[in-house]
Amino acid sequence: MLKIFTLENGRLAAIQPDEVATRKPIWVDAIAPGEDEREWVAKAFSVILPQPEHLRDIEASARFYEENEELHVRSDFLLGKKSDSRSIIVAFVLSDNVLFSVHDEDLPVFQHFRLRSHGQPDLVADSLDVLVDLYGSDVEFSADALEEAYADLGEISGTVLSNTLSDKQAGVVLANIAHAEHLNGRIRRNLMDTRRAISFLMRSKLLAPEQFEEARQIMQDIDSLDGHTAFLFDKINFLMNATVGFININQNKIVRIFSVAAVALLPPTLIASVYGMNFRHMPELQWANGYLFALSLMAASVALPFWLFHRKGWLK
């Protein structure tokens, strides 16, 4: 799918492919383009759109470079704000004052930017503005995702710190903490990738003074969000340790009960062993009340340790 945009009265306006010759586009957004769409772009703009297998290289020389008067940038964008969301690689090609973006799925950042630039006049003035503002929108999206992660961790904190967790509840809490850590890691990786892209644009000397200042502000926003992600990691580790501590306490309670039971049952076991001997001359062997005496003695030997353990608080 191709989404083609031009500037009209300072706003982004969508146009059809057959209008390209008469209405100069500044942005061509290719979402999972087919071969016929790739051929049309190559014929209409003399630009070869990157293939999917070329988007996954992580070295800087493959993600940020200039070639044949074209600027090439590869960046990761978050598909959503939940922990199960993925990062989608987007390839940007800037050629002849037209920005081409190639990605497999439509992204929330792109959707929001298209709506905002269509409704807000003078938000962008050229294709470089589109590229820089897309990165700015990506940072804002990451900040929103961090705020949601904070809210989720706040609920988890209330559960961990206000109640005595059962093992089942602790399992649910650990799963939620793992989801929060996964999302925080994705956000941090996304911010790191955006920083690399913005740094490359600033070094390229293609940005106008206003665009350079906007890029500098984006870098400052990323630096501030880095501190938030680090704090979030610390909070996740604290909640993880607290939850594991509750699990250990529950397990220690179980082990303590078994230990107390084992100690309390030792005296009656000893008594039963003594009176289970088959010697001919035993004083109580012919005693009519010997059986009841032995049972009473065993019951007393069980009750006395439990009373002592309860008094010392070892059974709580």
Image (cartoon, rainbow, N blue to C red):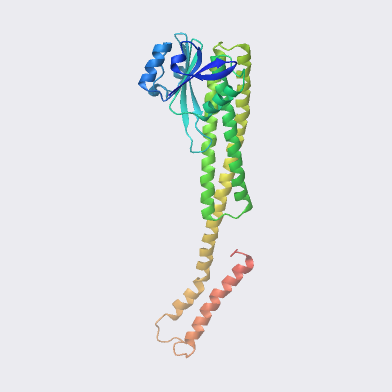
Q: Is residue 101 left or right of residue 207?
A: left
Foreground residue among 84 and 295:
84
Task: Kindly identify the residue that appears in the image at 57 percent across and 41 percent down.
Answer: 237
Q: Is residue 95 left or right of residue 245?
A: left
Foreground residue among 12 and 295:
12
Kindly indicate the quadrant of the structure image that contains residue 201.
top right
Task: Kindly identify the residue that appears in the image at 57 percent across and 34 percent down.
Answer: 145
State whether residue 170 is above or below residue 145: below
Foreground residue among 272 and 111:
111
Foreground residue among 138 and 13:
13
Task: Kindly identify the residue that appears in the image at 43 percent across and 27 percent down.
Answer: 104
Q: Which image quarter is the C terminus in?
A: bottom right
State whether residue 309 is above or below residue 115: below
Kindly indicate the quadrant of the structure image that contains residue 129.
top right
**What percent of the width, then of the height, locates residue 23?**
50, 12
State whether residue 203 is above or below residue 234: above
Q: Which image quarter is the N terminus in?
A: top left
Q: Is residue 186 left or right of residue 155?
A: left
Task: Kindly identify the residue that appears in the image at 52 percent across and 34 percent down.
Answer: 185
Counting every numbered tag in the picture gives: 0
**What percent of the width, then of the height, locates residue 220?**
63, 23
**What percent of the width, then of the height, locates residue 139?**
58, 27
